[in-house]
Each structure stands twice: as C-alpha cells, then as structure tokens.
Amino acid sequence: MSYKLFLDDQRIAPDGWVQAWNYQDFREALNELGRPTTIAFDHDLGDQHDEFGNLLVPEPDGTAAALHVVMNPEILPLTFSVHTMNFSGGHRIKSLMAEAGSKLVLGPFNSGWEEKK
C-alpha cells in the first residue's frame, strides 16, 4: 500500500495522509501499513500531565520516531519533511534521516527554517 505518514500531536493531517497522533500511533501505522512513501515529522509530541501540571508519562518525541525508522531500513521512506518549531529537535530528525539516505523535501506545515535539498 502506498501512503504518506503524518506525525503530529496537534495538527490534523492533510487529506490523503495517515495521521499518527503520537509515537505509539506512528509505530502501529508502520507495522500495519509498511513502508510509507514519505513521513512528515513533528518533534514535540506532548507529554501526559496530571491536573497540577506534573509530568506523568514522557512521550517519545519525533527524534525517537526517526531513530526507529533509520534502525529499520525496510521502512525508510524515500523522502521526509519536518514541520516542528523546535529547531534543535528538527535538526536531529533531519540529520538522522538524511544520514540514512532519505531525502528532505518541503512538506505540509513547513516551519519556515527548513532548507530545500
């Protein structure tokens, strides 16, 4: 199945994309659907907090998702994009994916600082 995977905890995936709201959804989509043609990454995926704001469960972030992909080359997409406002997190995702051989492209919700390669 040919599909595009969109990882973001707040933004709704554009039409034609498979939505992954968190790291667990991301892994499930990859397990069920296989290798996507492209992945659009957000970095900060929203930790779970109690009613007082105390951290309950840290959510794996976009870097963890990218690391999962590069450690499993059979699911590495040909292209990817990053749409996070977290500069250092976005840079880590870009570095991991590019080093593994995936090509950075402009995708939905670009954050303005992504360069075209």
Image (cartoon, grey):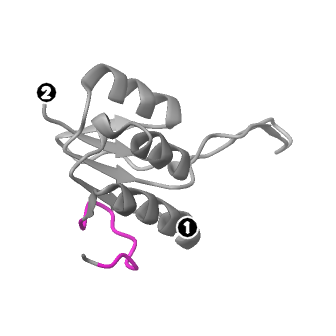
User: 35 or 72, which is in the foreground?
Assistant: 72
Q: Which residues are magenta?
A: 105-115
Q: Is residue 94 above or below residue 1?
A: below
Q: CA distance from mark 1 to mark 2?
A: 31 Å
In terms of secondary structure, where does tag 2 sit? loop
Residue 104: x percent and y percent? 28, 65
Give the image quarter of residue 79: bottom left
Say left or right for 61 vs 83: right
Q: How many marks?
A: 2
Q: Is residue 9 visible?
A: no
**1 or 2: tag closer to the N-terminus:** 2
Q: Which residue is mark 1?
A: 86
Q: Residue at x 49, y 46 (%)?
A: 67
In terms of secondary structure, where does tag 1 sit? loop
Say left or right for 44 vs 31: right
Q: Is residue 78 above or below residue 74?
A: below
Magenta-drawn stretch, dominant element (helix, strand or loop): loop
Q: Is residue 25 visible?
A: yes
Q: Residue at x 35, y 27 (%)?
A: 29
The C terminus appears in which quarter of the rendering?
Answer: bottom left
Q: Residue at x 13, y 34 (%)?
A: 2
Q: Amino acid at mark 1?
A: Asn
Q: Is residue 22 above or below residue 79?
A: above
Q: Residue at x 29, y 35 (%)?
A: 74
Q: Is residue 110 magenta?
A: yes
Q: Which residue is mark 2?
A: 1
Residue 1: x percent and y percent? 13, 27
Residue 17: x percent and y percent? 23, 41
Q: Is residue 52 magenta?
A: no
Q: Amino acid at mark 2?
A: Met
Query: Which is in the foreground here, disc 1 or disc 2?
Result: 2
